[in-house]
C-alpha cells in the first residue's frame, strides 16, 4: 500500500502544556502533520514557533486547557479553526475568535457520561441518602446525563439554563436564585463565561437553605468559592462535593477539615473512555475541516 509522505498531510499546529503528552497523538499523526513546538529538544518558544508556521497553518489543536489568548491568536493570521480537547472553553479568547470568524470545537458530549457518574457519586457520598428534590444549573450535555441518572432515584428535577429547552420535560427556572429557593441540591455543570462567573453567589447559596448541598463538576469560578467555604464552615449549607477549584491545584485549606465536604482532584474526565471518545471526536473534526464537511461539537460564539 502506498504511504502518504508526511509533508503531504494536512498541517495541524499543536498547543499543549509542557509535560502534557496527549494519548491520541499517535493516531492523529497517521492522518495529519502535527507541528508541536515541544517536540524539539530543547523545545522552541511558542512565539517563534507559531510565527514561523503562521503562513501555512489553518488549524490549531488546543490540548488540555492551555490558554489561547489574543496574543497567541495574533501570531496566526490565517487561522480558521481551533479544535479544543475540553468541554469548557473559558481558556480560549472567544471574543477574538468571533471577531476573526475562527470556529471553535470542544469535547462535545465525549465526557458527559463520566462527568455525570462522578457528579452523582459525589452527591451520594455527601448525602449517604437521597433527597427528594434536585436542581441542575446548566442542563447541557453533562446535565442531561446527570438528570438521567438521578431520575430513577425518584428525584424531582428542575433546571436553569439561558434558554428553556423544548425537548426537556423538567421545570425550567429563568434564574438560579428561584431555582435555589425551590430545591435542596444544586448540581453545577454549566460553561464558565463572563455571564456565568460567580453565578452561584452567596444569595443563591443562602436561598438553598441549611439543608442545601452543592455539587460542582463545571468550573469553580461558577461559584463564589470564598462564600461557599464560609457557608460550609458556619454550617449554613449541609454539604458540598467538589471536583473543581478556583486556583487549582490549590484547594482552600478549610475544606480539608470539613466532614460534610467531598473533594476530588478535577478528575471527572480522566478515564480511558473519555480519552477514547475525545480521540474519535478530534479526529472526526479534523477530517471534517480538511474535507470541507460540517464540524461536530461547534461552540456557539455569541
Ligand atoms: O474540565 C474538563 C473539561 O472542561 O472538559
Image (cartoon, rainbow, N blue to C red):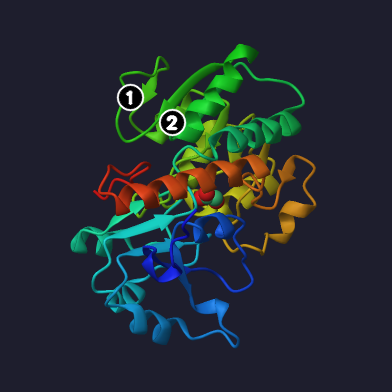
Left or right: 178 in relation to 22: left
Measured from the top left, where is residue 232 in percent x and y? 67, 45
- Residue at 20 percent across and 64 percent down: it is 100
Q: Does the residue labelled 2 lie within 8 Å of ligand 1?
A: no
| Residue 107 in view, yes or no | no
Q: How many tags in the picture? A: 2
Regarding mark 2 in the picture, which secondary structure is present there?
loop
Query: Residue beneath label 2, please?
Result: 139
- Residue at 45 percent across and 62 percent down: it is 62
Height in image: 204 above or below 246?
above
> Which comes before the other along the chain, label 2 or label 1?
2
The quadrant where residue 131 appears: top right
Query: Badge 2, how many Cα within 10 Å: few under 14, some, many 20+?
Result: many
Query: Residue beneath label 1, please?
Result: 165
- Residue at 64 percent across and 71 percent down: it is 19
| Residue 250 in view, yes or no | yes
Measured from the top left, where is residue 3 in percent x and y? 47, 60
Label 1 near label 2: C-beta < 8 Å? yes
Amino acid at each position: 500500500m502506498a504511504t502518504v509522505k508526511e509533508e503531504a498531510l494536512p498541517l495541524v499546529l499543536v498547543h499543549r502544556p509542557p509535560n502534557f503528552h496527549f494519548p491520541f497523538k499517535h493516531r492523529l499523526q497517521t492522518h495529519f502533520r502535527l507541528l508541536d513546538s515541544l517536540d524539539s529538544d530543547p523545545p522552541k518558544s511558542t512565539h517563534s514557533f507559531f510565527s514561523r508556521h503562521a503562513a501555512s497553518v489553518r488549524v490549531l489543536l488546543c490540548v488540555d486547557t492551555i490558554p489561547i489568548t489574543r496574543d497567541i491568536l495574533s501570531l496566526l493570521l490565517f487561522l480558521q479553526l481551533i479544535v479544543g480537547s475540553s468541554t469548557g472553553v473559558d481558556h480560549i479568547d472567544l471574543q477574538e475568535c468571533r471577531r476573526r470568524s475562527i470556529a471553535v470545537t470542544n469535547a462535545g458530549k465525549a465526557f458527559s457520561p463520566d462527568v455525570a457518574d462522578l457528579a452523582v457519586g459525589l452527591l451520594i457520598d455527601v448525602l449517604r441518602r437521597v433527597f427528594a428534590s434536585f436542581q441542575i444549573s446548566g442542563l447541557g450535555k453533562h446535565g442531561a446525563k446527570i438528570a438521567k441518572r438521578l431520575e430513577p432515584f425518584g428525584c424531582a428535577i428542575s433546571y436553569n439554563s439561558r434558554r428553556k429547552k423544548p425537548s426537556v420535560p423538567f421545570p425550567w427556572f429563568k434564574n438560579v436564585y428561584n431555582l435555589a429557593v425551590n430545591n435542596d441540591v444544586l448540581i453545577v455543570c454549566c460553561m464558565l463565561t463572563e455571564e456565568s462567573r460567580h453565578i452561584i453567589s452567596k444569595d443563591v447559596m443562602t436561598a438553598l437553605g441549611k439543608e442545601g448541598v452543592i455539587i460542582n463538576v463545571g468550573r469553580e469560578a461558577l461559584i463564589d468559592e470564598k462564600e461557599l467555604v464560609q457557608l460550609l464552615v458556619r454550617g449554613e449549607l449541609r454539604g458540598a462535593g467538589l471536583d473543581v477549584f478556583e486556583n487549582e491545584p490549590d484547594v482552600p485549606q478549610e475544606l480539608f477539615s470539613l466532614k460534610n465536604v467531598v473533594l476530588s482532584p478535577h478528575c471527572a474526565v480522566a478515564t480511558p473512555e473519555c480519552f477514547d471518545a475525545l480521540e474519535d471526536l478530534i479526529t472526526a473534526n479534523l477530517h471534517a475541516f480538511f474535507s470541507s464537511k460540517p464540524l461536530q461539537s461547534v461552540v456557539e460564539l455569541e
